[in-house]
Image (cartoon, rainbow, N blue to C red):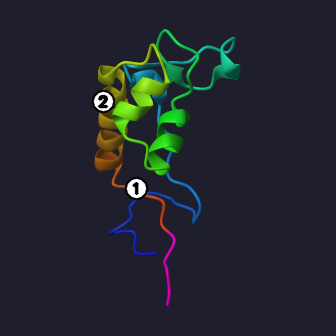
Protein backbone atom coordinates (compact mmCIF):
# COMPACT_ATOMS: atom_id res chain seq x y z
CA UNK A 1 0.00 0.00 0.00
CA UNK A 2 1.33 3.43 -0.90
CA UNK A 3 1.85 5.25 2.41
CA UNK A 4 1.90 8.63 0.67
CA UNK A 5 -1.76 8.14 -0.28
CA UNK A 6 -2.75 6.18 2.84
CA UNK A 7 -0.49 7.49 5.62
CA UNK A 8 -2.26 5.59 8.42
CA UNK A 9 -2.01 1.90 9.27
CA UNK A 10 -5.01 0.10 7.84
CA UNK A 11 -6.48 -3.31 7.45
CA UNK A 12 -8.74 -4.48 4.69
CA UNK A 13 -11.71 -4.62 7.02
CA UNK A 14 -11.73 -1.54 9.21
CA UNK A 15 -11.03 2.15 9.43
CA UNK A 16 -9.94 3.98 12.59
CA UNK A 17 -12.48 4.07 15.41
CA UNK A 18 -14.29 7.31 16.13
CA UNK A 19 -14.11 8.91 19.56
CA UNK A 20 -17.85 9.32 20.11
CA UNK A 21 -17.17 11.26 23.32
CA UNK A 22 -16.31 14.21 21.05
CA UNK A 23 -19.74 14.24 19.37
CA UNK A 24 -22.14 16.59 21.19
CA UNK A 25 -25.22 14.58 20.15
CA UNK A 26 -23.94 11.28 21.55
CA UNK A 27 -23.40 9.87 25.00
CA UNK A 28 -21.79 6.70 26.30
CA UNK A 29 -22.44 5.14 29.67
CA UNK A 30 -21.43 1.65 30.74
CA UNK A 31 -24.88 1.27 32.34
CA UNK A 32 -26.70 2.08 29.08
CA UNK A 33 -26.42 -0.63 26.42
CA UNK A 34 -23.02 -1.64 27.82
CA UNK A 35 -21.44 1.65 26.74
CA UNK A 36 -22.66 1.58 23.15
CA UNK A 37 -22.79 5.13 21.75
CA UNK A 38 -26.41 6.35 21.93
CA UNK A 39 -28.19 9.56 21.02
CA UNK A 40 -28.09 11.82 24.07
CA UNK A 41 -31.06 11.56 26.43
CA UNK A 42 -32.10 8.26 24.85
CA UNK A 43 -31.28 4.58 24.69
CA UNK A 44 -31.23 4.64 20.87
CA UNK A 45 -27.86 3.39 19.58
CA UNK A 46 -26.22 5.57 16.96
CA UNK A 47 -25.68 2.53 14.75
CA UNK A 48 -29.48 2.37 14.29
CA UNK A 49 -29.26 5.55 12.21
CA UNK A 50 -26.71 4.00 9.87
CA UNK A 51 -28.61 0.72 9.63
CA UNK A 52 -31.71 2.65 8.60
CA UNK A 53 -29.85 4.81 6.10
CA UNK A 54 -28.38 1.64 4.62
CA UNK A 55 -31.94 0.38 4.09
CA UNK A 56 -32.78 3.61 2.20
CA UNK A 57 -34.80 5.01 5.09
CA UNK A 58 -34.89 8.78 4.86
CA UNK A 59 -33.89 10.91 7.82
CA UNK A 60 -37.49 12.09 8.10
CA UNK A 61 -38.71 8.48 8.25
CA UNK A 62 -36.06 7.66 10.85
CA UNK A 63 -37.19 10.58 13.00
CA UNK A 64 -40.84 9.50 12.66
CA UNK A 65 -39.96 5.98 13.76
CA UNK A 66 -37.88 6.96 16.79
CA UNK A 67 -39.50 9.50 19.09
CA UNK A 68 -37.11 11.61 21.09
CA UNK A 69 -34.36 11.75 18.48
CA UNK A 70 -34.12 15.20 16.89
CA UNK A 71 -33.08 16.28 13.44
CA UNK A 72 -30.31 18.34 15.06
CA UNK A 73 -28.91 15.20 16.69
CA UNK A 74 -28.95 13.29 13.41
CA UNK A 75 -27.24 16.16 11.61
CA UNK A 76 -24.63 16.43 14.37
CA UNK A 77 -23.83 12.71 14.13
CA UNK A 78 -23.52 12.83 10.33
CA UNK A 79 -21.38 15.97 10.51
CA UNK A 80 -19.16 14.37 13.16
CA UNK A 81 -18.59 11.24 11.08
CA UNK A 82 -17.97 13.21 7.88
CA UNK A 83 -15.54 15.57 9.59
CA UNK A 84 -13.58 12.70 11.13
CA UNK A 85 -13.31 10.91 7.81
CA UNK A 86 -12.22 14.12 6.13
CA UNK A 87 -9.63 14.92 8.80
CA UNK A 88 -8.04 11.48 8.97
CA UNK A 89 -8.33 10.69 5.28
CA UNK A 90 -8.19 7.11 6.46
CA UNK A 91 -10.85 4.94 4.94
CA UNK A 92 -11.59 1.31 4.95
CA UNK A 93 -9.95 0.07 1.77
CA UNK A 94 -10.49 -3.17 -0.02
CA UNK A 95 -9.51 -3.16 -3.70
CA UNK A 96 -12.15 -4.55 -6.00
CA UNK A 97 -10.89 -6.43 -9.01
CA UNK A 98 -12.98 -7.44 -12.00
Q: Position of residue 57 (x, y in %)?
A: 43, 43
Residue 6 in which image quadrant = bottom left
Residue 89 in which image quadrant = bottom left
> Front-most of 69 and 65?
65
Q: N-terminal of the two: label 1 or label 2?
A: 2
Residue 64 in which image quadrant = top left
Disc 2 packing (10 Å; few <14; some 14–19; many ≥20): few
- 71 left or right, relative to 35: left
Residue range highlighted in magenta: 94-98
Let me know if residue 60 is in the magenta part. no
Disc sitting over residue 90 in the figure: 1
> Front-most of 49 and 87?
49
Dots 1, 2 in contact, CB < 8 A: no
Of badges 1 and 2, nearer the viewer stands: 2
What residue is shown at x 62% (from left), y 26% (from top)? 36
Disc sitting over residue 9 in the figure: none
> Front-most of 5 and 18?
18
What residue is shown at x 47% (from left), y 16% (from top)? 67
Question: Can see residue 17?
Answer: no
Label 2: element kind: helix
Please say if 59 is above or below 34. Answer: below
Disc 1 packing (10 Å; few <14; some 14–19; many ≥20): some
Predominant secondary structure, magenta span: loop
Q: Position of residue 17 (x, y in %)?
A: 52, 42
What residue is shown at x 70% (from left), y 21% (from top)? 34
Residue at label 2? Answer: 75
Label 1: element kind: loop
Q: Position of residue 45 (x, y in %)?
A: 56, 27
- 11 left or right, relative to 21: right
Amino acid sequence: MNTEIFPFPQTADCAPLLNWDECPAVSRNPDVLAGTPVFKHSRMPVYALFENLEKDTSIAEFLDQFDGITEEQVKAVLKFVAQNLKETRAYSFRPQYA
